[in-house]
Amino acid sequence: MKILVISDIHANLTALQAVLADAGKIDEAWCLGDLVGYGPDPNECIDLVRGLPNLKCVEGNHDAATLKHIDMNSFNPEARLALQWTEQQLRPDNHTWLDNLPERVVVDLVTLVHGSPRQPVWEYLLDTRTATLNFSFFDTPYCFVGHTHLPVLYYLAEENRMAKLIIPENSTQLALAPRTILNPGSVGQPRDRDPRAAYVVLDTDQWICEFHRVPYDIEAVQERMRDKDLPERHIQRLAIGW
Ligand code: ZN
């Protein structure tokens, strides 16, 4: 089976459309949260994700804050502005749909969460020390996370049971060995200084994953953000991939 793994779309419809076009036909889609926040197209992105085949999706911290599951004051003032704007835009059916997203989904051999298996909505897996601790918090061979907006693989080294990391190259195929934590990067707001949208395609027949980057029309998104008076800093950062 060919599975599309995406995360952190952040209401960027143009990036999401580019990813779906680039990925081609898929059997299933796994989405690791943060469908909204920052970007100008929250309803359009939720509509598109809801229609993906055999979708599995978890809640991110921006989704949770938009629904007031967590306090918006834990975000910086600009992110909070974008969340308040998003809250006003959400159609009732999309509000209900987001509201029903679980924090954790186990599918086949994979645990899906937004942040980390230890703290599914909030924790950032940014280093090997934090990753090492988190291997105790899931039972499946694999765990897929988003939240940092940085594509990465963490695996447990046999010799000392410490996590090591691989920063994947674009379009390289990597065999997933148990146990591994994978982050596909961000569709709508990459932060690794590469502004192209990021995603992963997973082949579950052989457990091979392929990390991809795809260019999209960033200026069109920036224009829609300006039309909607979204914070200038969020508009600028799209162009530099930060
Ligand atoms: Zn995010």
Image: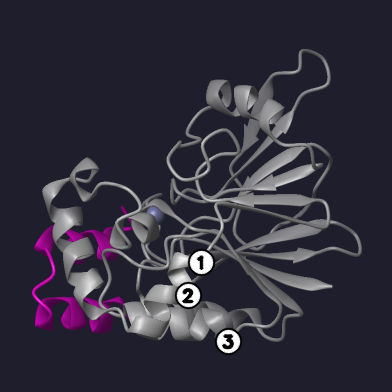
Label 2: how many residues lie within 10 Å, few (<14), some (14-19) or many (20+)? Answer: few
Vertical arrangement, residue 56 with respect to residue 165, above or below: below
Q: Answer whether residue 157 is visible to the viewer in this image.
A: yes
User: Which circle's residue, 1 or 3, is located before the other in the chain?
Assistant: 3
12 relative position to 239: left or right:
right
Label 1: how many residues lie within 10 Å, few (<14), some (14-19) or many (20+)? Answer: few
Question: Element under label 1?
Answer: loop
Q: Position of residue 34 (x, y in %)?
A: 42, 61
Q: Position of residue 10 (x, y in %)?
A: 36, 66
Q: Which is nearer the eye, 87 or 160?
A: 87
Question: What amino acid is at disc 3?
Answer: Gly
Prevailing SS of the magenta stretch: helix
Question: Element under label 3?
Answer: loop
Image point 22% across, 46% down: which residue? 75
Question: What amino acid is at disc 2?
Answer: Trp
Residue range in magenta is 216-242
215 relative position to 32: left or right:
left
Residue at numbered disc 3: 51
Where residue 80 sits, quadrant-wise, is bottom left
Question: What amino acid is at disc 1?
Answer: Asn
Image point 51% across, 28% down: which residue? 127
Residue at numbered disc 1: 100
Question: Element under label 2?
Answer: helix
Residue at numbered disc 2: 97
